[in-house]
Image: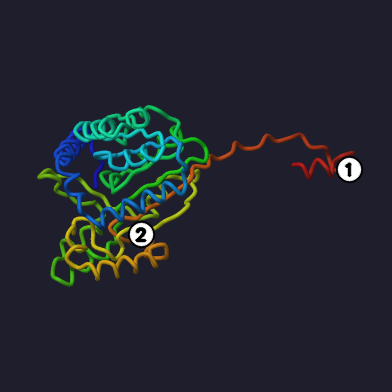
Amino acid sequence: MRKMKLRDESEAWKGVAEAFGRKARVYDDFGRQHPNLERMRAKVRAHVQQLLPPGGRLLEINAGTGADACYFAGQGYWVHASDLSPEMVAEIRAKASQNGLSQRLTVQQLSFTQLEEAQGGPFDGVLSNMGGVNCTSDLRAITSALPALLKPGGVVVWVVMPPICLWELAQGLRGDLKLALRRLRPGGVIAQVEGLPVPTFYHSPGRVRAAFGPDFQTLRLQGLSVFTPPADHKDFPLRHPRLYRWLVGLEERLSDHFPFQGWGDFFILSLRYQPSLSPPTLLSLPKLGEKGGRQARRRG
């Protein structure tokens, strides 16, 4: 895919902001009475809470309407939620005020490609949930800013849409090859969000890891909705409760194991920021045979 000129890229992000601005009005309604989406959010939150105790400072990028930001603020975290869409930002502020969380939850309209402007750092953790980072092909545009925002030892939890989704691939058996193969297109696809086109790119775990570089240590990789249907199949658990429970059980057994850990509607990747140490200063060592030479070589 050709690299966009700055003006084209700016216009594209305006289109993304408008699309998700429209989504802000309906997103919370979609999440109500949605057992699978609730299950997925609970698993993501558990990842964060296992790595970052309450009281930590958490930056959420592409925070949407603030469901996770409000949850973590309510659990005792200090949260700074950011999103590109002004409508999403307004929803987060309203939720924070309604739930008495404004002291623990701050909000900023900000693209994840402008994280050098993020307020409130340094942070103990950075969260990106539900495939927000799939809106860009250039993950380095996000990750390059994280070392300046994270404390040493800080954690990152990203939820990313991968190329392999078994549920969608299975649709090829029903003749829907367009859906079955869409995630495998190397140049990404154009998704329709509230009637507006949004570029979407599907990233493998290896590609995401590579974007972080050597200062980030992988802690855990887990497939999410590997066997259960993708999030847009809202009614499946209600129409097929026994089958849904069986699929959830299968996922619980296999989603941490290769190759399923990198498959699904999403995968959860957790990393720890361990900045490289500066090269040690070279000492002037005594020549062999001089007094103390052996001890000096050992210290060196």
Q: Residue furthest bottom?
A: 173
User: Which quadrant is the C terminus positioned in?
Assistant: top right
The label shown at residue 17 is none
Instruction: Compare residues 267 and 67 and report the one nearer the observer.
Output: 67
Residue 208 is left or right of residue 38, and the answer is right
Numbered tag placed on residue 223 in the rendering: 2
Judge from the rendering whether residue 205 lies leftward or rightward of residue 163; answer left or right: right
- Picture coordinates of residue 256, whole percent (x, y): 41, 62
Q: Quadrant of residue 280?
A: top right
Q: List x then y, in percent, for residue 263.
A: 33, 61
Nearer to us in this view, 4 or 31:
31
Q: Residue at x 30, y 44 (%)?
A: 133
Q: What residue is disc 1 on?
A: 289
The front one of 64 and 94 is 94
Depicted 288 relative to depicted 251: above or below: above
Residue depth check, mark 2 versus mark 1: number of the one nearer the observer? 2
Determine crowd level at label 2: few under 14, some 14-19, many 20+ residues with C-alpha closer than 10 A. many
Determine whether the residue tagged by mark 2 lies in a helix, strand or loop: strand
- Are there few (<14), some (14-19), or many (20+) residues within 10 Å of tag 1? few
Q: Is 9 rendered above or below residue 137?
A: above
Q: Are the residues tagged 2 and 1 within 8 Å (C-beta)?
A: no
Estimate the x, y position of residue 204 in percent, counting from the top left. Answer: 34, 55
Give the residue type at disc 1: Gly
